[in-house]
Image: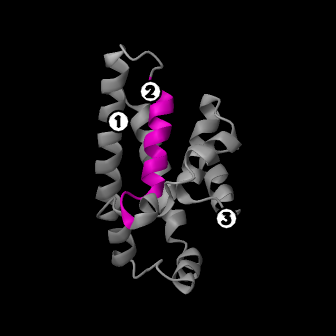
């Protein structure tokens, strides 16, 4: 399944933005869907507190999976991953004016402090856009020579 389609399907089936991104991108690196959803469960809604957008946080995990190393002495992979994460933050903010969940919601007239606000956010499809923007940024970064 295409990465965008996978992420959209996951989001529409109830996954958070972070879960949708990590599940979709992680699949190509051998991360199973259940593990991806568990690993990113606390990241949606900007760490459930309006901080960094969950889609971006899930994207940071995906970049670590794609570029990182299990060897703690591998500073080359660590530096490449840090650079890729910095690029993701910058590119996402360029597209959306911020990478902070609370700011993104405010800019788009959304509020998730109430059940009604959460329902309106789901209906607005804002998170769908943020998930696909994150995947676009990740795919661009990974396609470039780092």
Q: Is residue 51 magenta?
A: yes
- Confirm or deny contact between disc 2 and disc 1 (CB under 8 A): yes
For mark 3, what is the residue? 12
| Residue 141, x across and y down, in percent | 39, 37
The residues bearing labels 2 and 1 have C-alpha atoms spaced at a distance of 9 Å
Which residue is at 43% across, 80% downward? Answer: 110
Q: Quadrant of residue 98?
A: bottom left
Neighbour class for label 2 at 10 Å: few (<14), some, many (≥20)?
some
For mark 2, what is the residue? 67
The residue at the far bottom in this view is 116
For mark 1, what is the residue? 84
The N terminus lies in quadrant: top right
Q: Magenta segment, principal secondary structure? A: helix
| Residue 131, x across and y down, in percent | 51, 57
Q: Which secondary structure lies at badge 3?
A: helix
Which residue is at 37% across, 57% downward? Answer: 52
Q: In the rendered view, tell whether residue 40 sits above or below residue 69.
A: below
Neighbour class for label 3 at 10 Å: few (<14), some, many (≥20)?
some
| Residue 61, x across and y down, in percent | 47, 40
Which residue is at 71% across, 62% downward? Answer: 13
Instruction: Specify whether 142 is left or right of 37.
Output: left
Mark 1 or mark 3, earlier in chain: 3
Q: Which residues are magenta?
A: 50-68
Neighbour class for label 1 at 10 Å: few (<14), some, many (≥20)?
many
Q: Is residue 27 visible from the viewing direction of this image?
A: yes
- Confirm or deny contact between disc 3 and disc 2 (CB under 8 A): no
């Amino acid at each position: 399944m295409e990465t965008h389609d996978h992420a959209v399907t996951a989001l529409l089936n109830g996954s958070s933005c972070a879960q949708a991104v990590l599940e979709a991108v992680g699949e190509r690196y051998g991360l199973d869907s259940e593990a991806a959803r568990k690993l990113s469960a606390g990241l949606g809604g900007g760490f459930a507190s309006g901080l960094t957008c969950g889609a971006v946080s899930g994207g940071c995990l995906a970049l670590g999976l794609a570029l990182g190393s299990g060897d703690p002495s591998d500073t080359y992979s660590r530096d490449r991953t840090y650079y890729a994460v910095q690029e993701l933050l910058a590119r996402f903010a360029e597209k959306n004016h911020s990478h902070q969940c609370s700011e993104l919601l405010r800019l788009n007239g959304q509020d998730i402090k109430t059940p009604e606000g959460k329902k309106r956010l789901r209906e607005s499809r804002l998170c769908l856009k943020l998930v696909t923007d994150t995947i676009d940024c990740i795919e661009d970064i990974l396609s470039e020579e780092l």
